[in-house]
Amino acid sequence: MPKFHVERSIVIDKPLKEVRNSLINFKEWPKWSPWIIMEPDASIVYSDRQGQVGANYGWSGVLIGAGSMELMHVSEHALKMDLHFVKPFKSQADIYFTLKDNGNSTEVLWSMDSSLPFFMFWMTGKMKTFIGMDYERGLLMLKEYLETGTVDSFVHIEGVLRLEAQAYIGIQRTCDIKKLGEVMKEDFETLFDFMQKHHISQDRVPFSIYNTFDIFKGTTNYVACIPYDSDIELEDTWTRGKLEVQEVLKTTHKGRYAHLGNGWMTAMNFARLKKIKTSKKPVGYEFYPNNPVSTIPQELRTEICLPLR
């Protein structure tokens, strides 16, 4: 059977003991789980004696499937858990958390060792990539949960809706996905400065077009856009275009932009489950109905739209 290993890490500004005590209590996992965030009303059942070897919890949902996890080993710097999936297909994995004490902070390494049925050998690379992305989303939420007591990320699937036509001007670029937030912030600052300079109304909602999003190469090509339908002189590096009338699968994310991956994964899993055929290019759009400069991060809204084929 094709075996694979996945690991991701993060530094949390909390003492090791506090981090460990949270991780061995499965009742705290829904606060930061990269899967439960996609389906918060999924059925979850906990055993007694949480925090002790032998404790477990099970889940069952439409989007996240069904399975269970059991705490197998606890030491000062390491945890081991046994993960069993029942749906969408049966599988087993060994889960490890390795904790490194950095004084007032803790480095958390989350890893998985598993395998796929032989007939799914071709999925090994994809599984490593997708699980790695899930771990990155989860660790980011775990860090926020332990450091602040909450996670500012809420997802709601709106359904298939009609997207109206609109012309735009924008900045197109290709960048590393890990640098996307930083690079896109600079692009929109440039666009907003341009709007002020040319007295362009800021009443309409800015958005991004993701032409490509290659999770295997770690790159994306996007256009940061402001709606504008009049002639105006643009820099050579800018672009002009128009979104046509189309149907999209719309999902709304409320909270920090750093957690937008939760919205995207929810939308894509929902489309796959419902057999909704979405476009490969562009991959999707993000609309930003409130201004990040004047809106607190917890209240930021992002509308993720996957165009239908």
Image (cartoon, rainbow, N blue to C red):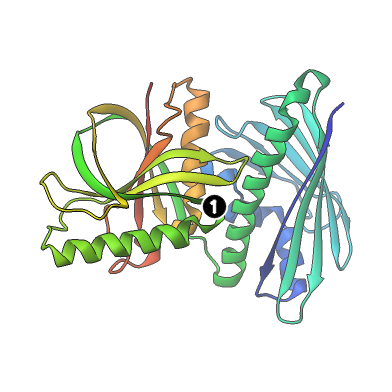
Which of the pair 56/267 is nearer the observer?
267
Marks counted in the figure total 1
Q: What percent of the width, then of the height, locates residue 57?
A: 72, 44
Residue 242 falls left or right of residue 98: left
Q: Which quadrant holds the N terminus?
A: top right
Q: Quadrant of residue 25?
A: bottom right
Disc 1 on helix, strand or loop?
strand
Task: Judge whether residue 24 can be spotted in this image.
Answer: no
Residue at 63% x, 46% y is 134
Pick out the residue farthest to the front.
236
Seen in the picture, residue 85 relative to 75 is either above or below; the reply is above
Seen in the picture, residue 9 relative to 7 is either above or below; the reply is below
Residue 61 falls left or right of residue 78: left
Seen in the picture, residue 106 relative to 233 is either above or below; the reply is below
Which of the pair 185/170 is nearer the observer?
170
Residue at 56% x, 55% y is 178
Q: Which residue is mark 1?
A: 176
Residue 94 falls left or right of residue 175: right
Identify residue type, mark 1: Asp
Task: Judge whether residue 97 can be spotted in this image.
Answer: yes
Q: Quadrant of residue 21?
A: bottom right
Q: What percent of the width, then of the height, locates residue 60?
A: 63, 33
Q: What percent of the width, then of the height, locates residue 180?
A: 48, 55
Residue 308 falls left or right of residue 39: left
Residue at 12% x, 57% y is 201
Q: What percent of the width, then of the height, locates residue 38?
A: 52, 42
Neighbours of disc 1 within 10 Å: few (<14), some (14-19), many (20+): some
Which of the pair 45/254 is nearer the observer?
254
Q: Quadrant of residue 64?
A: top right
Which of the pair 3/254 is nearer the observer?
3
Q: Which quadrant holds the C terminus?
A: top left
